[in-house]
C-alpha cells in the first residue's frame, strides 16, 4: 500500500516483518505450534472475498477479526483496504453523518481503534503487529505508539471473550493434531467445543466453530485451513455444524497443490456467511493440476478460472455429515450406485490391520537370513507395494513371529542375532513399560488366525483400487489392511466376486468420489471408508465371478504377479467385460 505524506510517497510491505519473523523460528517449533504464515496471494484473495466490497458509507465501522493473527498479514491488508475505502468516500461520510470527525487526519486512528481486532498466543508476533500498525500512521505529530487503543491482544483466540460480534472474520488458524496438544487443554476443547471437537480432531476445527459463533447476523468469514476436515471421519461433527449454522459461499480445494512454502499440507479456503439460505448454492473450485506452486503466484483469481481448476456449483442441502463435493455428473453416478446396492462391504466382511512390530529392524528379515530362524516362528511378510490387483507380488521378506516364543532359552540364537541389538528401543515401547508385552514380543501381533486363512488384502494408501486375494496365509505390515467374509455370508459371496467388482474401473471411480484425497493422486483406503463401499448381487454374479477366476488363473499360471508391470492382453479383455457387466447391473 502507498500513503501520501505531503509530496513524499511511502510504500509499506505488509509481509516484510512476518517473513523475517517466520524465518527466525525453528522449523520444529513452527510445526509444534501449527504456525504457517500465509502467502500474500492467499491473503489478498481472502480479503477480496470478505472486506474488499464492503459498503463503507452505510457501515463506516466494520469490525474485522483474526483469531490467530500472528504478525498480522490479514489485518494489515484489512487496514489498507479500509484506508482506501475511507479515503475515497471521506466526503460522502462527512455529508451523511454531518460530522467533522470524518477527515483524512482521523482515518488511521479510526481504523485501529474501531475496525481492526487481532489475537494470538505469541507475544513477539503481537508486538510486531502493533509496531506495523503504528508504522502505517502518516501523522508525523504522533511519535508515541500508546496514543491509540489497539484491539490487539496476546491471548488464546478460543478463550477470549468479546462484548460484540464481527462483520468479517479472516485468518489461517493453527494446525495442531490431537496428539500434540496438552492433556488439560484438550480436555478444555472437548468440553467447550464438543459440537465439533472429538478425540481425534485438529485444533483448527474449534476455530471454525468460534468464528461462526462470533459473526454478526450479516457477517462473512473466510479462512485457509487443511482440507482434511472435508473428508475425514473426525470431521463429521464439524461438517454438520457448518452446514446447519452457515451458508457456504465458496470452497477452493487445492488438493495436493503446494500453498505453503516447504510445508506439505493439503489446503482449502472456505468462505461462508452467517445468513442461512435454504436453497444456498456453493461455488466450488477444485484443483486439477497439483504441481502448481500457489505461493509463487501473484493472482489467485486468474488461476481459479483457468483450465487448472474444475469449477461447479453444489446445493448445500445435498450435504450431510459426508460432504460429497463433486460435479453433478459424478454425484448422479455415485447416488445411482448407493441406491441400487443392497449391501455395504462392512455387512459382508470383517476387517483388520496388519502387524505393528514396534521396530521392523528387529523382526523383519530378508530371505538370506531365514535359514537361521525356525519355521514355526517364521512368517512370509508383505508390504503395501506387494499388493497388486487380484494377486500379491512375491516377497523376499519374513516376519519373526516372536509372540510364539514361549521360552527365551529355546530361541536364544534367534533373539541374540536379530532382536537383542534393539532391546533398549523395544523396552521403551509403551506396552512394554506397562508390562503388557515382553520386551522381545511384537507390539501388536494380532491373532494368527486372522492371517492364516484366505482373505483379501489392500494397501492403506494407493492411486487406485488394489484388492488382492491371499491364498498363502501371508502376514502383512500396518500399511496393509485385510478382510475376510463373515460366516453368515460365506455361501453368499466369494472372494473372487468381491475383488472383481472392487478392482473394476466403475468401483475405482465410485470410491474416489467419497474417498479422502491425500494429494498427488494418492487416496486414503482406511477401513472406515472402504467398509462403506456398496455391494450388489444379481443375475450377473456368476459371470463376474467366473471372469475373475479366469484372470487369477492367467496371472498365476504365467507368473505375471512377479513382473506385474506387464499386463496380459487377455486380462485387460476380461476386466473390460467385468466392467460392462457391472454397468448393466447398476444401470449406468
Image: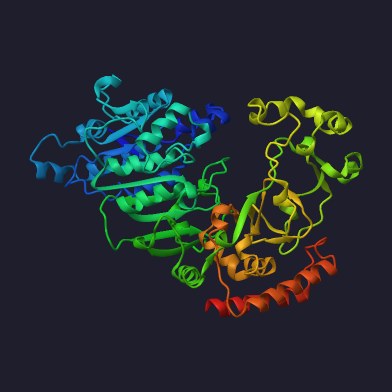
Q: For the N terminus, which image quadrant?
A: top left
**How far across and how far down the image is residue 262, in percent?**
58, 40
Instruction: Count how many numbered circles sit on residues in the image.
Output: 0
Q: Is residue 474 left or right of residue 309?
A: right
Image vertical order of residue 151 relative to residue 577, above or below: above
Residue at (45%, 58%) from the top-left corner? 304
| Residue 250 placement (x, y as % from top left) | 38, 56
Q: Is residue 566 above or below residue 109?
A: below
Q: Residue at x 68, y 47 (%)?
A: 354
Say left or right for 98 vs 475. Answer: left
Q: Is residue 95 above or below residue 139?
A: below
Q: Quadrant of residue 413?
A: top right
Give the side of residue 383 with respect to residue 342, left or right.
right
* Residue 441, quarter of picture: top right
Residue for point 9% across, 37% down: 99
Which residue is at the far front? 488
In the image shown, does 386 or 490 lie closer to the viewer?
A: 490
| Residue 436 x %, y % | 65, 30
Depth check: give the residue in front, 353 or 225: 353
Q: Quadrant of residue 162?
A: top left
Front-most of 158 and 298? 158
Residue 85 seen by the camera = yes
Q: Residue furthest left?
A: 98
Left or right, 336 with respect to 535, comes to left
- Residue at 29% of width from left, 29% of height from top? 137
Amino acid at each position: 500500500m502507498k500513503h501520501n505524506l505531503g509530496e513524499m510517497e511511502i510504500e509499506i510491505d505488509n509481509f516484510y516483518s512476518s517473513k523475517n519473523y517466520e524465518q527466525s523460528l525453528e522449523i520444529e517449533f513452527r510445526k509444534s505450534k501449527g504456525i504457517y504464515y500465509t502467502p500474500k496471494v492467499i491473503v489478498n484473495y481472502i480479503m477480496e472475498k470478505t472486506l474488499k466490497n464492503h459498503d463503507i458509507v452505510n457501515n463506516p465501522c466494520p469490525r474485522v477479526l483474526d483469531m490467530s493473527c500472528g504478525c498480522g498479514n490479514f489485518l494489515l491488508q484489512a487496514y489498507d483496504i479500509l484506508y482506501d475505502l475511507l479515503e475515497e468516500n471521506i466526503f460522502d461520510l462527512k455529508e451523511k453523518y454531518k460530522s467533522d470527525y470524518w477527515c483524512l487526519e482521523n482515518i488511521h486512528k479510526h481504523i485501529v481503534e474501531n475496525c481492526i481486532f487481532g489475537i494470538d498466543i505469541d507475544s513477539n508476533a503481537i508486538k510486531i503487529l502493533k509496531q506495523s500498525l503504528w508504522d502505517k500512521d502518516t501523522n508525523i505529530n504522533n511519535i508515541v505508539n500508546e496514543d491509540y487503543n489497539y484491539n490487539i491482544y496476546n491471548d488464546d483466540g478460543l478463550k477470549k471473550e468479546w462484548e460484540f460480534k464481527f462483520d468479517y472474520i479472516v485468518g489461517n488458524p493453527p494446525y495442531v493434531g490431537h496428539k500434540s496438544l496438552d492433556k488439560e487443554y484438550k480436555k478444555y476443547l472437548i468440553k467447550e467445543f464438543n459440537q465439533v471437537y472429538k478425540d481425534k480432531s485438529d485444533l483448527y476445527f474449534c476455530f471454525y466453530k468460534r468464528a461462526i459463533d462470533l459473526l454478526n447476523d450479516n457477517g462473512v468469514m473466510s479462512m485457509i485451513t487443511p482440507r482434511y476436515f472435508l473428508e475425514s471421519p473426525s470431521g463429521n461433527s464439524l461438517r454438520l455444524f457448518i452446514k446447519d449454522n452457515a451458508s457456504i459461499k465458496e470452497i477452493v480445494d487445492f488438493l495436493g497443490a503446494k500453498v505453503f512454502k516447504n510445508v506439505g499440507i493439503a489446503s482449502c479456503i472456505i468462505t461462508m456467511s452467517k445468513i442461512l439460505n435454504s436453497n444456498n448454492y456453493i461455488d466450488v473450485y477444485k484443483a486439477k493440476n497439483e504441481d502448481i506452486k500457489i505461493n509463487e503466484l501473484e493472482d489467485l483469481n486468474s488461476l481459479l478460472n483457468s483450465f487448472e481448476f474444475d469449477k461447479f456449483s453444489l446445493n448445500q442441502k445435498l450435504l450431510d455429515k459426508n460432504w460429497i463435493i463433486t460435479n453433478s455428473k459424478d454425484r448422479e453416478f455415485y447416488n445411482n450406485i448407493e441406491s441400487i446396492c443392497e449391501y455395504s462391504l462392512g455387512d459382508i466382511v470383517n476387517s483388520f490391520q496388519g502387524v505393528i512390530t514396534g521396530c521392523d529392524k528387529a523382526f523383519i528379515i530378508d530371505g538370506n537370513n531365514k535359514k537361521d530362524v525356525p519355521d514355526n516362528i517364521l512368517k512370509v511378510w508383505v508390504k503395501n507395494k506387494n499388493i497388486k490387483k487380484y494377486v500379491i507380488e512375491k516377497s523376499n521378506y519374513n516376519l519373526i513371529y516372536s509372540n510364539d516364543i514361549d521360552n527365551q532359552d529355546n530361541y536364544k540364537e534367534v533373539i541374540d542375532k536379530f532382536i537383542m541389538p534393539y532391546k533398549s528401543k523395544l523396552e521403551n515401547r509403551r506396552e512394554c513399560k506397562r508390562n503388557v508385552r515382553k520386551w522381545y514380543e511384537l507390539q501388536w501381533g494380532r491373532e494368527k488366525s486372522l492371517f492364516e486363512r484366505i482373505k483379501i488384502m489392500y494397501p492403506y494408501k494407493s492411486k487406485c483400487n488394489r484388492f488382492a486375494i491371499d491364498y498363502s496365509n501371508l502376514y502383512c505390515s500396518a500399511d496393509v489392511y485385510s478382510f475376510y467374509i463373515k460366516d453368515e455370508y460365506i455361501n453368499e459371496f466369494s472372494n473372487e466376486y468381491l475383488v472383481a467388482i472392487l478392482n473394476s474401473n466403475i468401483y475405482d471411480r465410485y470410491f474416489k468420489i467419497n474417498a479422502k484425497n491425500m494429494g498427488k493422486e494418492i487416496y486414503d483406503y482406511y477401513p472406515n471408508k472402504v467398509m462403506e463401499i456398496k455391494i450388489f448381487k444379481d443375475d450377473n454374479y456368476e459371470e463376474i465371478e467366473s471372469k475373475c477366476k479366469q484372470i487369477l488363473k492367467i496371472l498365476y499360471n504365467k507368473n505375471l504377479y512377479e513382473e506385474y508391470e506387464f499386463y496380459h492382453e487377455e486380462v485387460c479383455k476380461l476386466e473390460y467385460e467385468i466392467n460392462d457387466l457391472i454397468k448393466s447391473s447398476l444401470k449406468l
